[in-house]
């Protein structure tokens, strides 16, 4: 068995071990175990990058990059890149407990969907891939971090308000204000990217078929997400929204994104955005 065959198993195993050891280190409040977990996860991330690079090198044209394996693998990689950005900017190492399991799920999904492919019409395919797929994936990877920060915010807020007290491992968690800053940065960076990605898709549709909107289920849900995203962006920047409301809305938008990726792409046969064997 060569490296291309064992590489996915190594990445999945390292991501799983990294998650397990970080949770264990947090429960025991043992910094050495958590550092070891991050080292394991970092090794998995490096091998994940090697796997993606191999797929890019071996791609026979842009059409080869629309397989389920490449797209889901790319999204899982993007989630960890987004985590790294927030770790660097806000010292939010705690979000690894969200980023690593999500990366594991999407990478495992990638390897389970290697035989399916998203249809990519030939006209303007390069522009479509770079602007549409690239910007949407960056935005959604950032949104995954807002989802994790939102869940943590709601959990901590509930324990504080009910005076339940924090469990041992929760005492090392960042403050509510830090989780709220994650939400702010994600919205500021993610909403413009999502808007560009969605707009480029509609422009491409008009150039390809002279029709901007076709009432495709994926398009309808994308517009709903855009409306919620825009409202959240406006409320945060114009009215200084903070705390519980933006956390709940970020969670809702992320769950709609997951519904779009898994529900519509795999289960709705009438969409032309879906995956086909």
Image (spheres, rainbow, N blue to C red):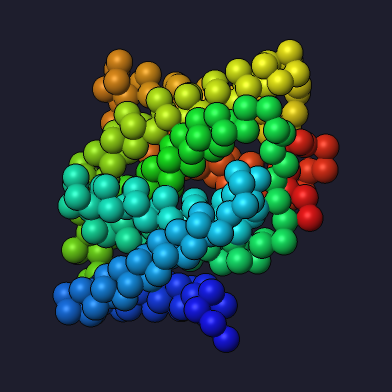
Measured as percent of width and height from the top left, residue 191 is found at 41, 28
Residue found at x 49% / y 62%: 54
Residue lying farthest to the top in this orientation: 210
Instruction: Examine the rendered structure and indicate whether residue 100 appears above or below residue 16.
Output: above
Image coords of residue 275 (percent x, y): 73, 48
What x and y, as percent, mark residue 15?
A: 41, 71
Is 275 left or right of 173, judged from the image as shown?
right
> Looking at the image, which is closer to me, 213 or 114?
114
Quarter of the figure that contains the C terminus: bottom right
Inspect this view and state whether residue 167 appears. Answer: no
**Residue drawn at x 77%, y 50% as measured from the top left:** 276
Residue 122 picture location, percent across and down: 70, 33
In the image, taking residue 217 as reference, residue 98 lies left or right, namely left
| Residue at 72 percent of width and 56 percent of height | 116
- 268 left or right, relative to 102: right
Residue 129 shows in the view = yes
Task: Spot the residue most to the right.
Answer: 270
Q: Which of 191 and 254 is in front in this view?
A: 191
Quadrant of the image for the N terminus? bottom right
Closer to the camera, 159 or 42?
42
Q: Residue at x 23, y 52 (%)?
A: 87
């Amino acid at each position: 068995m060569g490296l291309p065959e064992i590489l996915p198993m190594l990445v999945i195993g390292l991501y799983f071990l990294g998650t397990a050891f970080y949770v264990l280190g947090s429960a025991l409040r043992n910094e050495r175990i958590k550092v070891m977990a991050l080292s394991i996860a970092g090794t998995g991330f490096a091998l994940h990058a090697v796997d993606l690079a191999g797929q890019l090198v071996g791609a026979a044209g842009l059409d080869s990059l629309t397989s389920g394996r490449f797209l889901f693998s790319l999204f899982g990689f993007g989630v960890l890149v987004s985590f790294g950005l927030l770790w660097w900017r806000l010292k939010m190492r705690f979000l690894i407990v969200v980023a690593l399991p999500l990366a594991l799920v999407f990478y495992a999904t990638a390897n389970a969907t290697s035989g399916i492919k998203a249809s990519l019409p030939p006209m303007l395919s390069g522009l479509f891939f770079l602007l549409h797929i690239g910007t949407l994936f960056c935005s959604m990877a950032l949104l995954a971090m807002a989802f994790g920060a939102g869940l943590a915010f709601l959990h901590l807020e509930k324990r504080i308000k009910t005076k339940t007290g924090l469990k041992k491992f929760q005492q090392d968690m960042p403050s509510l204000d830090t989780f709220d800053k994650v939400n702010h940065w994600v919205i500021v960076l993610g909403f413009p990217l999502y808007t560009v990605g969605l707009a480029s898709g509609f422009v491409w549709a008009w150039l390809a078929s002279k029709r901007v909107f076709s009432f495709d289920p994926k398009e309808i849900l994308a517009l709903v997400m855009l409306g919620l995203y825009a409202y959240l962006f406006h409320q945060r920047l114009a009215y200084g929204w903070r705390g519980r409301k933006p956390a709940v809305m970020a969670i809702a938008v992320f769950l709609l994104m997951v519904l779009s990726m898994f529900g519509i792409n795999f289960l709705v046969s009438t969409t032309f955005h879906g995956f086909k064997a």
